[in-house]
Image: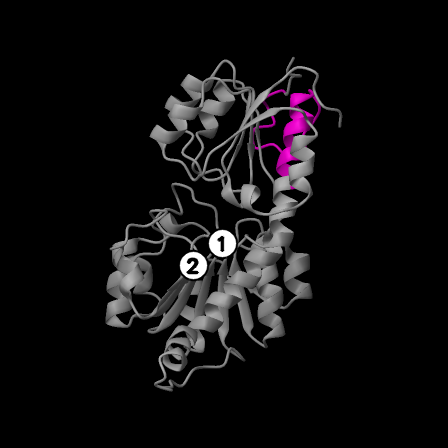
């Protein structure tokens, strides 16, 4: 992919792209574009301050609202999402304004699945408690649980959900899952039972792992109403989006013991305020949205985001586009 002769300006906000060494830096530098960087994720006000004089945008989880897009056009020609979640982007307005929105499916499923089990094992083996007790010199111990023969319910059997299922089977777990688009061949090969409804997942699962997109239908899906249908002491794992879980209901359920533990890589507010109530509970393991942040995954995501952008700016078909009905046009 050849560099452009004319200087183009690209806004780059994803921090893992910027902070992780790899070939993606060389790919971007080879374009000859002027790169403007900021430390995302950005709120609407911060994003508004940076757009308007950029031709392209490599974004993470910035708030790209209609207001942002209105200011960014007509100069902004392409948005390349680093990752797969586009719930922070006004996709409808991108399409209306003729801005191709690109994304990078299939690049982080392995590392997110691994992180899911990091959270699960940390909860079941009381990892944080035991680390604190040894570092503090108290040698206090708690009895944990095996994963063997436990039932994990996976909500969203896409690329990441499938990788979770494969690893669950390796631990000797029973796996049930729910997804609108059911892959019968995969389910049969890995002995995954199909749950026709979420209620079936809730009733049967010792652990529930969330791998669904954030949509109006899935927002606050995990709430007091669903907790009442779950086993007492269920563990819930969230490497999807924080807004899939109703935070106040989760706090109440954790305090009452209805939910035994919550392992999450995402929150409803990121970064959270220091007094975010979930961070104060002993049966919560929370990581700072890093499930996909490995050297291997970052390079795959970032390289794909750059390749997507270069193709689209050259008027060529990108690797993956959220709104394929919007034509890509060479930017001159």
Residue 101 position in % (x across, y down)? 55, 29
- For mark 1, does the 10 Å Cα neighbourhood hold few (<14), some (14 to 19), or many (20 or more) residues? some
The relative height of residue 316 versus residue 270 in the rendered view (above or below) is above
Q: Are marks 1 and 2 in contact (CB under 8 Å)?
A: yes
Looking at the image, which is closer to me, 100 or 189? 100
Asked if residue 307 is among those painted magenta in the image, a careful observer would answer: yes
Marks 1/2: CA distance? 7 Å
Would you name the residue on which mark 2 appears? 287
- Disc 2 secondary structure class: loop
Residue sitting at 55 percent across and 41 percent down? 18
Q: Does residue 326 belong to the magenta stretch?
A: yes
Task: Identify which residue is drawn at 42% across, 42% down.
Answer: 215
Q: The C terminus appears in which quarter of the rendering?
A: top right
Magenta residues span: 303-327
Q: Where in the figure is residue 223, as x and y percent of width and height?
A: 31, 56
Q: Which residue is mark 1?
A: 290
């Amino acid at each position: 992919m050849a560099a452009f002769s004319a200087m183009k300006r690209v806004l780059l906000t994803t921090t893992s792209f910027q902070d992780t060494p790899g070939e993606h830096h060389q790919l971007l530098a080879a374009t000859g574009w002027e790169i403007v960087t900021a430390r995302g994720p950005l709120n609407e006000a911060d994003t508004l301050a940076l757009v308007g004089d950029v031709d392209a945008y490599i974004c993470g989880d910035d708030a790209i609202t209609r207001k942002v897009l209105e200011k960014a056009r007509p100069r902004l020609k392409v948005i390349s999402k680093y990752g797969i979640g586009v719930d922070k982007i006004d996709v409808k307005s991108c399409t209306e304004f003729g801005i191709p929105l690109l994304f990078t499916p299939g690049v982080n499923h392995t590392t997110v699945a691994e992180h899911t089990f990091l959270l699960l094992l940390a909860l079941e083996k009381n990892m944080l408690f035991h680390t604190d007790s040894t570092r503090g010199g108290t040698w206090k111990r708690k009895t944990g649980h095996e994963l063997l023969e436990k039932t994990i319910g996976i909500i969203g059997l896409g690329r990441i959900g499938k990788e979770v299922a494969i690893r669950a089977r390796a631990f000797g777990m029973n796996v049930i899952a729910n997804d609108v688009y059911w892959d019968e061949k995969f389910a049969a090969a890995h002995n995954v039972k199909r749950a026709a409804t979420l209620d079936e997942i809730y009733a049967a699962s010792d652990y529930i792992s969330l791998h669904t997109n954030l949509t109006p239908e899935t927002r606050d899906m995990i709430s007091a109403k669903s907790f009442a249908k779950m086993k007492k002491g269920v563990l819930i794992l969230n490497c999807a989006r924080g807004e899939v879980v109703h935070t106040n209901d989760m706090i109440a359920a954790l305090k009452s013991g209805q939910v035994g533990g919550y392992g999450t890589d995402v929150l409803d507010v990121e970064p959270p305020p220091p007094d975010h109530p979930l961070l104060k509970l002993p049966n919560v393991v929370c990581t700072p949205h890093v499930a996909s942040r490995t050297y291997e995954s970052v390079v795959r995501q970032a390289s794909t985001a750059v390749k997507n952008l270069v193709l689209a700016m050259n008027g060529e078909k990108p690797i993956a586009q959220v709104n394929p009905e919007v034509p890509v046009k060479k930017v001159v």
